Image (cartoon, rainbow, N blue to C red):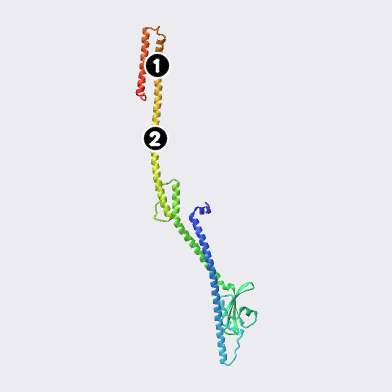
Amino acid sequence: MTPLQKIRTSFSTQLSLWVAGFVLITSGVVIGLLASFSEEVIRDETIDTTIQALENTALRIDNTLRQSEMTARLEHRRIRINRSRIEQLIEENNSLATLQRSLPNMQLYVIRRDSSQFDTFITGGVSGYRQLMYDDKEIYIFTQPIGDRAFCLAGVSPAEDIYGKYGHMQWILLSWGIAAIILLIYCLYLVIAFHLRPLHRLADSAQAIAEGNLNTPIHDTRHRDETGRLQNSLSMMQRRLAAYMGEMQQKQDTLNRQHAELKAAFDEAQSYEEKKTKFLHDMTIRMAVPVEQVYRSTNKICHDYAGLSKEDIIALQTDILQGSETITELLDQLIKDPASS
């Protein structure tokens, strides 16, 4: 039997497959929605974290510059804040390395807020981010002003860094989802098999009864579900069938006994008929001689009366009387007890 034929002949396997298919579709939809939601959550979380880190970096740089300006004012000297000075502070504070912990491929730039250059137009001069396509690649540009100064920080990161955590989480989610689906399907199969086990036993018992084994046990059950009602109905049907078969067996025994009696009576009647036929045949043979004797004597008297002497007539008369007596005795014997003869 092929696996497809086994599936077609097993209701529990078909039901398990239908439930498994429903669970797979539902789980796929749920995992898809969860993955989509997680992607948005991770993206927003990464963006918020990056903006916060860039804001902290800008705040530290601004505080450092303020301290430098205050020190220079107390020393009655002037200090010039330019791009090189800010880049030096970024390098000294290792700010880029801090940002690259979450976004490994991020590049940090210092641009002027009031510049008319194209890069400044793209990034803007306010805190936030922009999503752009550059060289057929999706990139994110984060900007953060350094206090109220004329400079701002611009962090450029590819989209792969933004969704990096999502890719890792996607594999984890997919692995846990597959494991959970397999476990759920296995549990569903066990539950379905457990509930359908009585139905399988009933099917086997019904098959055995159909094959003629009426002594196959089908016990009553206290369950009131469909399987329980079916089992109780089959048990009652089995008892009634056994009682009916018992009655049929008794009637069969009675018919066999009557048949034996009728056969014995028929054999006896046939034997009697044979005896009767044989007796009649014997009587016929035994009566033929005296009848022939009476016939010859009577015929002789009738035709040769004139030429017969008295002694001849007496002898013929004697023969006729003896033949008549013999015939009478045979008839009496036939009338009284023909079977014994």
Which mark is drawn over residue 260? 2
Residue depicted at x 38% and y 36%: 258
The x, y position of residue 238, in whole percent, is 41, 48
Query: In this image, 58 relative to 264: left or right?
Result: right
Amino acid type at mark 1: Val
Q: Is residue 249 above or below residue 172?
A: above
Residue 86 appearing in the image: yes
The x, y position of residue 264, in whole percent, is 39, 32
Q: CA distance from mark 2 to mark 1?
A: 45 Å
Residue depicted at x 36% and y 8%: 311
Q: Observer-nearest residue: 200 or 329?
A: 329
Mark 2 nearby-residue class (10 Å; few <14, some 14–19, many ≥20): few
Which mark is drawn over residue 291? 1
Of mark 2 and mark 1, the one earlier in the sequence is 2
Amino acid type at mark 2: Ala
Q: Is residue 102 above or below residue 258?
A: below
Contact, mark 2 vs mark 1 (Cβ under 8 Å): no
In what quadrant of the picture does the C terminus appear?
Answer: top left
Give the quadrant of residue 42. Answer: bottom right
Q: Is residue 145 above or below residue 328?
A: below
Residue 87 appearing in the image: no
The x, y position of residue 82, in whole percent, is 61, 85
* Name of the residue lying farthest toward the bottom: 76
Q: Observer-nearest residue: 299 or 144?
A: 299
Residue depicted at x 40% and y 12%: 298
